[in-house]
C-alpha cells in the first residue's frame, strides 16, 4: 500500500507532478522556494521532522532547444541538482526513483532494453544521462526511462519519421503505481507502449485534430530517429498496461 505521507516528489508543478496529484494528493510536493535542488542545506532543512522514505525525482529541464542555448542551466539542474538529490538520499537512507528519458539512446536501433548501450545525441539527453550516473552510485535507487506527453497532443504538427514508445501522462501514472508498491525494485526499468511514429501516437490521443507532418530534419535540435523501448521487464513484473 502506498503511504503518501512518506513520499516526496520533486517537480510537482510539472506535467507528471500535476497528473500524479490526482491519484496521490497526499505526497509531499515542495515548490522551488522551499526545496531547490541546487540548495543542499535548504533540502536538508525541508526533511526535518518528516518521516520520508521515498524520494521521486522528476524535476528537470526538458527542452532540447533551450538547453542547446544554455547548457549550464541543464548542468546545474539535471546533473548537479540530481547529484544533490542522490547525496540527500544517502544521508537520509531514502529510496530514490529517478525519471530519465528514452533520449539517452542513440536512436539508430529502437526497441531498446534496459541493458542496451546508451549514447545521447543532444545536450538534453546528456544532462539526463549525467543524472543517471549519479543515481547509479546509490544502490537503493531505480531509474525509470520513459517518454510521455499531455493527455491530448499539444502541437499542430507531429514527426512522421521518429519512432517512440511514448505514452500519455495519465497512462504513465497508472503504470507507475505498481512500481511504487514494489519496494525492492532497483536498477533500471523502461515504461512505455508499443513502437509507433510520433504521428501515430498523436492521432491516438487526438483523433479529431488535423495534424501537419513534421520531419526530425526540420527542427533546430538533434532528434533521435528511433528511441522505442522494450518494456518486457515491466510486462513480466506487472503485466501489460492497458
Image: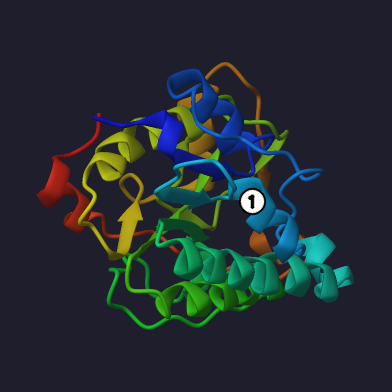
Q: Where is residue 129 in the image (x, y as percent from the top left)?
A: 54, 75
Left or right: where 27 falls relative to 223: left
Foreground pick, 150 / 218: 150
Residue at 52 percent of width and 41 percent of height: 50
Give coordinates of residue 57: x percent, y percent: 54, 53
Judged left or right of residue 180, residue 43 is right
Judging from the image, the colouring scheme is rainbow
Position of residue 72 relative to residue 214, above or below, is below
Count of numbered circles on the image: 1
Taking the image as drawn, is residue 220 in sight?
no
Toward the viewer: 175 or 163?
A: 175
- Furthest-front residue in view? 49
For this rendering, which residue is in front, 182 or 15?
Answer: 182
Locate residue 2 relative to residue 228 in the image: left or right.
left
User: In the rendering, at what x and y percent does residue 195 appear?
Assistant: 35, 51
Relative vertical location of residue 109 with respect to residue 163 in this rendering, above or below: below
Q: In which quarter of the image is residue 118?
A: bottom left
Residue at 69% from the left image edge and 34% from the top image edge: 13
Q: In which quarter of the image is the C terminus?
A: top left
Judging by the rendered image, the residue that carries numbered circle 1 is 59
Based on the displayed image, in which of its 4 quarters is residue 233 positioned? bottom left
Quadrant the N terminus occupies: top left
Relative to 21, is 227 above or below? below
Q: Can residue 195 be seen in this view?
A: yes
Mark 1 element type: loop
The structure residue drawn at horizontal position 30% and vertical position 47%, both measured from the top left corner, is: 194
Amino acid at each position: 500500500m502506498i503511504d503518501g505521507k512518506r513520499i516526496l516528489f520533486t517537480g510537482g508543478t510539472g506535467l507528471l507532478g500535476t497528473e500524479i496529484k490526482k491519484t496521490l494528493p497526499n505526497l509531499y510536493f515542495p515548490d522551488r522556494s522551499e526545496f531547490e535542488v541546487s540548495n543542499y542545506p535548504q533540502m536538508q532543512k525541508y526533511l526535518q521532522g518528516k518521516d520520508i522514505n521515498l524520494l521521486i525525482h522528476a524535476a528537470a529541464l526538458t527542452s532540447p532547444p533551450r538547453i542547446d542555448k544554455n547548457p549550464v542551466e541543464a548542468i546545474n539542474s539535471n546533473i548537479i541538482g540530481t547529484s544533490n538529490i542522490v547525496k540527500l538520499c544517502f544521508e537520509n537512507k531514502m529510496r530514490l526513483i529517478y525519471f530519465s528519458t528514452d533520449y539517452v539512446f542513440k536512436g539508430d536501433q529502437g526497441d531498446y532494453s534496459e541493458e542496451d548501450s546508451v549514447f545521447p545525441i543532444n545536450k538534453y539527453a546528456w544532462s539526463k544521462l549525467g543524472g543517471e550516473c549519479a543515481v547509479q552510485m546509490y544502490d537503493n535507487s531505480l531509474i525509470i526511462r520513459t517518454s510521455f506527453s499531455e493527455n491530448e497532443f499539444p502541437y499542430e504538427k507531429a514527426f512522421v519519421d521518429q519512432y517512440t514508445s511514448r505514452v500519455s501522462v495519465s497512462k504513465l501514472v497508472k503504470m507507475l503505481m505498481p512500481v511504487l508498491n514494489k519496494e525492492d525494485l532497483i536498477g533500471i526499468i523502461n515504461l512505455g507502449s508499443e513502437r509507433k511514429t510520433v504521428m501515430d501516437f498523436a492521432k491516438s490521443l487526438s483523433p479529431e485534430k488535423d495534424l501537419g507532418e513534421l520531419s526530425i530534419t526540420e527542427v533546430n535540435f538533434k532528434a533521435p530517429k528511433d528511441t522505442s523501448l522494450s518494456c518486457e521487464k515491466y510486462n513480466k513484473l506487472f503485466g501489460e498496461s492497458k
